Image (tube, rainbow, N blue to C red):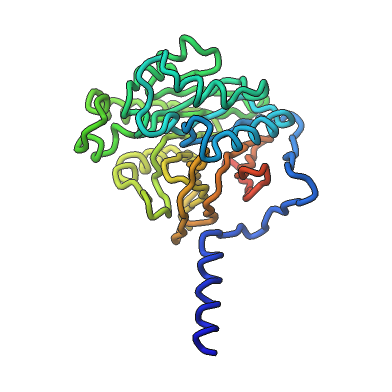
Amino acid sequence: MHNSILILSLLAIILFSCTSTPEKPMPVATAAPVIQLKKYPEGFNFFVISDWGRNGYSNQQEVADQMASQADSIEPEFIVSCGDNFQVSGVESVDDPLWMSTFENVYKKPSLHVDWFPVFGNHDYKGNSQAEIDYSKISRRWRFTSRYYTFVRPINDLVSARFIFLDTPPLINEYYQKQGYPDVAKQDSAKQIAWLKTVLKNSKEQWKLVFGHHPIYSASTKHGNTPELIQRIKPILEKYKVQFYVCGHDHDLQHLKEKSGKLDYMVNGAGSETRPCATNDLSLFSKSVSGFSSVTFHGDSIRYTFINVNGQPEYSFERSYK
C-alpha cells in the first residue's frame, strides 16, 4: 500500500511540475478549436515567435496556422522573431531554397504578410548570416536591416514604445570556442554594448522592450541562464528601466521575474519543436508546448499572452510601464 501511494505521488509531481500558474489563471474555453483574443479599441498589437525554422515540420506549420487565425482578428502591426530562424545550419544565400520551404510557404496567409523584425540565433550563425540581412532587399516583409537595431512606435497620443533588437551570439563565449560559427568572430561585441547604452540613455519612451535570442534567465535544463548576458546586459536594462527582455533559445514558453525586480523575462522558443521544461525560483509560468506570443498595448498597460499550437491561451498577464 505504501509503495502504491509513493508511485501515485511521483506521477503527480511529473505531470504538474512544469506548469506554474498565475494568481488568476486565464480561463480556457473548450467549445471552439480556436479562441480569439479580445481586441482592445485603439490597441497596438504584435506577435513574437522564435526557434521556428524547420521546413514546416515539428509543429511549425500548425503554429503558423494559428498565428494566421489570430492575426485575422487581432491584426498585429508586426511580428518579432527571436532567432533560430533557420534551424540546424542557417541559410547559404538569399537564393537558398530554405527561404521558400521554411519561411515564405509556411507563413503564407495574408494576415501574416506584415513586417517581420528578426534577430540572429546561434543556428543562424552556422550559415551565411549576412544573407539573412540581404534578404531584406528581396522580401517586402523581412525587415532585418542590421545585426542590431531599434525603432519607436506611438501607442497613443501620450504613450510610445521603443523596441530594441540585439545580436546575442557574439556576446557569448562558447561560440568563439566552438567550430562552425564563422561570422561570430567578425563582430564587435563591445561596440554593440556601447550602442545599447547610448540608445537607452537617450530613450524618452515610456515603454522599452529588448529582444534577443539567448535568455538572460531561463529555468530550462537544456540551456538555462546565460552568465554573459547576466553580467553584461542585465545591469544596463535595469539601469534604464527596461520593462521586458524577450528571447528564445530554450524550446518552451516561460515567464520569469525576480521578486524585487521590475523586469519581466519572457522565453518564446516554441515556434516548432519543444523540449522538456522546468521551473526555478524566478518562474511565474513554464510549459513545454509549441506556440507563440500575442502582445497588446492599451493605454499605459500591456497584455502579454502565450498561445499554444491549438490556438488556446496558455497564460496571460498585464502590467503597467511604471
Quadrant location of the C terminus? top right
Please state the horizontal and vertical placement of residue 206, each as a whole percent of the image: 56, 33
Left or right: 124 in relation to 46: left
Left or right: 284 in relation to 32: left
| Residue displayed at 34% across by 34% down | 122
Left or right: 309 in relation to 252: right
Please state the horizontal and vertical placement of residue 301, each as a whole percent of the image: 64, 40
The number of callouts visible is 0
Residue 7 in view of the camera: yes
**Can you name the residue that lies furthest to the right here?**
31
Residue in the foreground of this view, choosing between 25 and 232: 25
Instruction: Determine which quarter of the picture holds residue 155.
Output: top right
Residue in the foreground of this view, choosing between 259 and 306: 306
Residue in the foreground of this view, choosing between 46 and 235: 46
| Residue displayed at 54% across by 21% down | 104
Quadrant location of the N terminus? bottom right
Residue 243 in view of the camera: no
Please state the horizontal and vertical placement of residue 107, each as a whole percent of the image: 58, 26
Please state the horizontal and vertical placement of residue 277, each as a whole percent of the image: 47, 55
| Residue displayed at 39% across by 29% down | 120
| Residue displayed at 52% across by 54% down | 286
Left or right: 107 in relation to 283: right
In this view, 276 is above or below 67: below
